[in-house]
Amino acid sequence: MNVADAMTPREEVVTAELPGTRTDVLEYLQERAFSSVPVVKETDDGTEYRGLISRDALIEQPDEDQLVMLMDDVPTTTRDASLVEVAELMVGEVARRVPVVDGDFEGIVTVTDVVHAIAAGDQPVEAVVGDYATEDVNTTYEGAPLPVAERELSYANVPYTIALGDDGRMSGLLTEVDVLDVARIVEGEEETGDNFPDQDSEWSWEGIKAVGSRYLPTRNVEIPAEPVSSFMTDDVVTVSARKSVQEAAQLMISNDIEQIPMVSGDQLVGIVRDVDLLRALRD
């Protein structure tokens, strides 16, 4: 398969346009559970691709309004590239969504698009989950406040965490999407203190003058303080190490999920993410 066979064409892609605001992008990510949104600019010559804005950028830079300052520079591909080539690009560059650009912005191809091709058998893979799952699993306590779990996701640099109950067993799964669904931007003020210019400064006005307390508008991402258990998915889909990569891909597509815990009996032994399945295409 080529990228053209799997991608979402321009007319069906949700984009943010310059000039625009972070609020527009946040609404797109919350409503549609995207990991990122392409930013474009309409010109006399067509639709010009400018960059990608991710969930992480919005949470990590709550005071930034300008889309141009929030954009990530990610690799692009073309319609004629093979699906195997774009899978290698996604794995190598850690890019979940790759814009398709050939002069104009033509569309986007995602990790989910490639997983869909594996699930449908369009990209045959002879491998089992155990060959590509990892035993390193990000976990948190189900009673931890959600803001703490969000910081754990950020520090671990993964989009999920397995929630553990009081007995240390898996009780649920929390993802970046779950956090973003309930996050909101709140306005506030920050006191900067008194300002006393130096008497000899050419910028001083009428010598030493107390300007007084100054307040600057600030923004913060507010995340509910309720425990992880209030937001996690407790009906968790799981796989065994012997499950085929194609079957795991089918589970991801049918359940609209990006990662599946791997179990042996009732014990958590690893996790397989959708990007892990892409590595099977290279082998």
Image: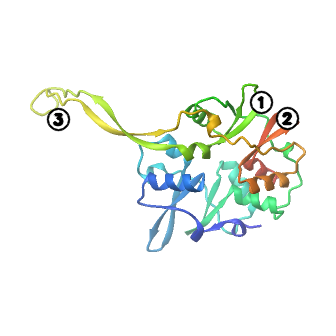
Say whether marks 1 and 2 touch (CB < 8 Å): yes
Q: Is 142 placed left or right of 55 in the picture?
A: right
Mark 2 packing: few (<14 Cα in 10 Å), some, or many (20+)?
few
> Can residue 73 be seen in this snapshot?
no
Mark 3 packing: few (<14 Cα in 10 Å), some, or many (20+)?
few
Residue 203, label in figure: 3
- Residue 199 locus on image (x, y percent): 14, 26
Q: Amino acid at mark 2?
A: Asp
- Residue 216 locus on image (x, y percent): 31, 37
- Residue 139 locus on image (x, y percent): 70, 32
Q: How far separated are the C-alphas under marks 1 and 3? A: 64 Å
Residue at image point 61% right, 59% down? 76
Residue 266, label in figure: 2
Residue at image point 56% right, 33% down? 226
Mark found first going from the N terminus, 3 or 2:
3
Q: Amino acid at mark 3?
A: Trp
Residue at image point 77% right, 30% down? 169
- Residue 83 image-quadrant placement: bottom right
- The residue most toward the left is 206
Mark found first going from the N terminus, 1 or 3:
1
Mark found first going from the N terminus, 1 or 2:
1
Q: Nearer the viewer, residue 273 or 238?
A: 238
- Which label lies toward us, 3 or 2? 2
Q: Amino acid at mark 1?
A: Arg
Residue 58, label in figure: none
- Residue 191 image-quadrant placement: top left
In the depicted structure, whether residue 149 falls above or below residue 127: above
Q: How far separated are the C-alphas under marks 3 and 2? A: 70 Å
Name the element at disc 3: loop
